Amino acid sequence: MNAFWRMTGFALILLTGAATLAALHIGSQRDFALAKERYLENSQAASRATAKTVEDALRAIYENVRTLTYLPSVQNLDRHGTNLGDEGRATIQQIYNNLANNVSISEVYFLPLDFDPDRYDPVTGKLEEPILQFDQLIVNARARAEAADAKKPGKLDDQSLTRPAEEVETYEYHELARQLAWLKANYPNSSNIDGLNVPIIGTKELITCDNTDFIHSGNDADRSGFILSVPVFSADGNLRGSVSAIMLTSALRKLLPSTDYVIANANYGFESDQHRLSTSLAAATHSFTAPDPNLIYSEVIPLSLNDPRSAWRLWAGFPNSRFENDVDVRSVRQFELASYAATVIVTLQALVCWYAIARTMSMQTEAAETLERRVEERTAEIQHLATHDILTGLPNRGLLADTMDEALTSLRGGEKLAVHCIDLDRFKPVNDTLGHPVGDELLRAVARRLRQQAGDTAMVARVGGDEFTILQLLLDGDEQAGALASRVMPSPTSSPSRVIRSVSAAASAWRSFPTTDRARIY
């Protein structure tokens, strides 16, 4: 196999491997896109479900507080709530119990329209407070049960329902006063309200009381919350005050399945979980009003709450590492890498196999060529041995006869053939006295000299032990034969003309013999 086919085979294997890798890459990209699409769909579904949970909780507060505002006992409350009877209190208690079973509310206040936390109440002689504070009504059932159990004989006195001395409510009261001012300016009467579409307004995050199960430390950061207030109108439609519910941020945060979500209200500056976001998130915003483009999944979902002052939203942003660790994505990546590795291994194996095949075929070709060359050399050697003398390397009797036949049949006008017959006198004594090796060397020396004297137009042959023949082609006349004879064996008794005559006679005699008998002369 020549180099071209070897290189062609290697190129085809590499091209096939590259094409396979390209096809695998395209397929993996398609599978990756599908896995990403499924991940985004699942992430969006999870975010929408979380948004629905938060929205339902906020709407539950809104609907229960709104229900309170329509109670006649609430609409007709006097400044200090002295006209709230047992039936009205029982109704409020039932509504609060229903609210507490669904959403943890820290406190609920009933406020008169002229509430001023910086003004002293002439009746109580203290700074003004809301008409009623219903925080003691909605402490959860477990806390009340534990308190009752603690009062049994042998139990320590329960302090779970006792307000801590360090509890500060001034932040709540001043924010409630600001809410009332806004309601007075925007909803002085119920004429601006369509049916039950009563507004509910919120606040920024502030320090509240910590009388729920969510808070145990008493730290201000753990007592933060916000206020949701609904206006209260009298029977004649005029604004009388508000019912306000305070929800701890920790209670709202408990509605979220992870720290990948933030409940935000940009106008209030409220963010439920910004200080607890996963450190892997790339979010740099503090308003959470738009998705984070650096995250593979991020979305802002509006929360339906009838707040005319600002919009509530759920911001969702999942760390990119979660996508990379997704089961579908990891499967695609692992299959892609495994496919790449398998393709590379198969390609390398194919290259190795092709190299072995090409090497084997090359070795076979070389072996065949070597064998053929040796056969040719041996054939040529055998043929040379058959037509040449072994000792001197000169053509033998058979080759001389064949050459002479060919020469005689191919002579052209003016051309002649001269045959010089030479033998060595007294050669036998050389062998007998000096030995055959010396005799052989003598014969080789004679052969070399004869070849040297014969030139290119004559053939020297050994036809016997010490007998040689020179077959000469005469191109320029008979004198060439005499000149060659003089060079080979100069003799004072031999003239060129005599030599020529003898040579010509020998040539004529050679022609007279049949072809099959010419070899017998020698």
Image (tube, helix red, strand yellow):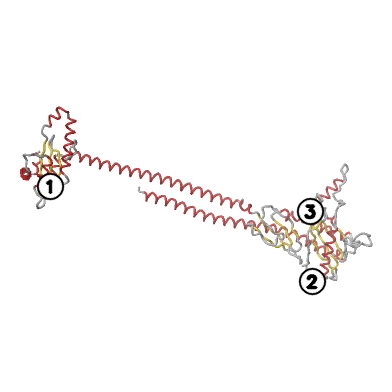
Q: How crowded is mark 1: few (under 14 residues within 10 Å), some or many (20 or more)?
A: many
In the picture, measured across the screen, residue 89 lies left or right of residue 439, that is right
Residue tagged by mark 1?
473
- Foreground label between 2 and 3: 3
Disc 2 target residue: 192
- Tell me the crowding category of disc 3: few under 14, some 14 to 19, or many 20 or more residues within 10 angstroms, Cα based: few
Is label 1 in a helix, a strand or a loop? strand
Residue found at x 67% / y 54%: 281
Quarter-of-image position of residue 395:
top left
Q: In this view, does 446 lie above or below 197?
A: above
Q: Residue 132 carries which label?
A: none
Label 2 secondary element: helix
In space, the residues marked 2 and 3 are separated at their CA atoms by: 38 Å
Q: Tell me where residue 485 sits by quadrant.
A: top left
Please identify the quadrant where the C terminus is shown: top left
Residue 257 visible, this angle: no
Tag 3 secondary structure: helix
N-term-proximal mark, 1 vs 2: 2
Mark closer to the observer (1, 2): 1
In this rendering, which labeled residue sits more in front, label 3 or label 1? 1
Quarter assignment of residue 312: bottom right
